Image (cartoon, rainbow, N blue to C red):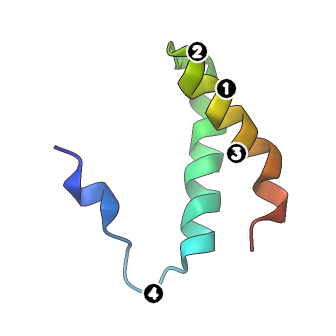
Amino acid sequence: MYEHLAERPVGLPASQLQQALLSAAQWHLDEVHDPQLAAELRAWIEIKPRLG
């Protein structure tokens, strides 16, 4: 179902992709209903500035 998400766009470094995904997650964090997933996203968002 989500196999396409594992593929990285050509030419986009992994660190930029990670930051883009975290930025998107920040905008929709209030819509995440799974408490464990929300906590994990918050932890990743917290370390986002230190990602390459």
- Residue at (50, 79) in percent of width and height: 12
Q: CA distance from mark 4 to mark 3?
A: 23 Å
Q: CA distance from mark 1 to mark 4?
A: 30 Å
- Label 2 neighbour load within 10 Å: few <14, some 14-19, many 20+: few
Query: Residue at label 4?
Result: 11
- Tell me if 9 is positioned left or right of 36 in this view: left
Mark closer to the chain start, 3 or 1: 1
From this viewpoint, which residue is outermost toward the front? 36
- Label 4 neighbour load within 10 Å: few <14, some 14-19, many 20+: few
Query: Residue at label 2?
Result: 35
Question: Quarter-wise, where is residue 5 in the image?
Answer: bottom left
Mark closer to the chain start, 4 or 3: 4
Q: Say which of 17 and 47 sits in front.
A: 47
From this viewpoint, which residue is outermost toward the left? 1
Q: CA distance from mark 2 to mark 4?
A: 34 Å
Judged from the image, the secondary structure of the residue bearing numbered disc 3 is: helix
From this viewpoint, which residue is outermost toward the bottom? 11
- Residue at (32, 61) in percent of width and height: 6
Judged from the image, the secondary structure of the residue bearing numbered disc 4 is: loop
Q: CA distance from mark 3 to mark 1?
A: 9 Å
Question: From the viewer's perspective, is residue 3 above or below residue 34?
Answer: below
- Label 3 neighbour load within 10 Å: few <14, some 14-19, many 20+: some
Query: Residue at label 1?
Result: 39
Mark closer to the chain start, 2 or 3: 2
Q: CA distance from mark 1 to mark 2?
A: 6 Å
Judged from the image, the secondary structure of the residue bearing numbered disc 2 is: helix
Quadrant housing the N terminus: top left
Question: From the viewer's perspective, is residue 33 above or below residue 9?
Answer: above
Q: CA distance from mark 2 to mark 3?
A: 14 Å
- Tell me if 2 is positioned left or right of 28 in this view: left
